[in-house]
Image (spheres, rainbow, N blue to C red):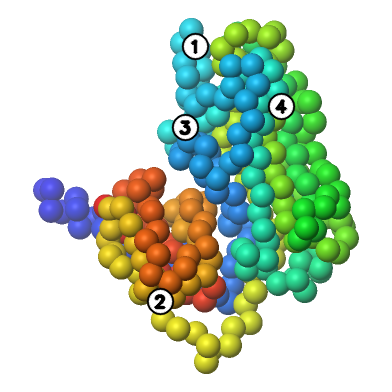
Amino acid sequence: MQTTNLKHNLIIMKRTFITLSLMFGIAVLSSAQTNLLTNPGAESNYDGWIKTDGGDGWSINVVELGDMGAPHSGNNFWISSYEYCTLAQTIDLISAGYSEAALDAVPDIKAGAFVATNTRTAAVATIKVELCTENDEVISTHFVCNNYEIPVNTTWEEKSLVISNYGMGVRKLKFYLIGIDTRWWAGFFGAQFDDAHLSLAVSPTTAIDEASIKAITVLPNPSSDFITLGESSGLIRIYDLKGSLVLSHSAIANEKIDIRSLNNGVYVLKTGHQNIKLVKK
């Protein structure tokens, strides 16, 4: 029975990987399914985010008086406190593989997150995106929600925004989650956040000089702690089987890349021109 179940699970994982590989293919990449944010739902605590604490600071899954609820998905979610708490993340779109021509065609940008409150206090949430030049100059600021008061005992609801017609020159996106409670209670009763998302309605650069492509080998694979790309270098991005970006890293030749923060399972490691199945054990 155990052997049969194992084979069944392996078949499901293989089919999922094939589907995901098609999603992340070089010719077609569905940006609606590609979340540019690293660690969008607190599964790796605060990795990838710049954290600013207010009051008693941010917390993850702290249960106060037994009424914090469950995550929207996964195992974790963020909770703010009685002064403004901020999580911020910057996406360099050129490093992520988008061409200047594609960006200057002004593709739609979709941003958002799920928000909630506990059973005892209301809270206030702000989600915003800054569109910036390559020198971090802010071109424009867009609010998914701005000082939005979430009623007490609100289960997860999605706040999202599509940003269009914003003009040329955008090279970076800065994404912010900001939360506070409405009663100034000590502890962690502020706005709750989970499953943040940021995506572009355009694929990364697809024009590839095939003569310049070099096959990349990931070793060891499977791995429990570190991998290396050998003599290869450049930006790598690792996605889980839901299509969420879980790790982004600019690798150098023969560098040991730390994957210990990843949960055991199957991932897709994407370079500029290859999709590689990666197994964390």
Does residue 109 appear anywhere in the picture?
no
The tag earlier along the polypeptide, 1 or 3, is 1
**Mark 1: amino acid:** Glu
**Mark 2: amino acid:** Glu
- Residue at position x 49%, y 85% from top? 213
Of labels 1 and 2, the one closer to you:
2
**Residue 207: x %, y % from top left:** 63, 82
**Secondary structure of the residue carrying numbered label 1:** loop
Q: Count residues near mark 3 (Cα–Cα under 10 Å), then give few for <14, some for 14-19, many for 20+.
A: many
**Secondary structure of the residue carrying numbered label 3:** loop
**Residue 43: x %, y % from top left:** 46, 39
Question: Quadrant location of residue 160?
Answer: top right
**Secondary structure of the residue carrying numbered label 4:** strand
Residue 115 relative to residue 165: left or right:
left
**Mark 3: amino acid:** Asn
Determine whether label 4 and label 1 are within 8 Å by CB: no
Which residue is labeled 1 in the image? 64
**Residue 167: x %, y % from top left:** 88, 60
Query: From what the image shows, is residue 155 above or below residue 249?
Result: above
The tag earlier along the polypeptide, 3 or 4, is 3
Label placed on residue 125: 4
The tag earlier along the polypeptide, 4 or 1, is 1
Q: For the residues marked 2 and 4, what is the alpha-carbon distance in whole angstroms?
A: 46 Å
Question: Quadrant location of residue 13?
Answer: bottom left
- Residue at position x 19%, y 50% from top? 5
Which residue is labeled 3 in the image? 76
- Residue at position x 86%, y 56% from top? 166
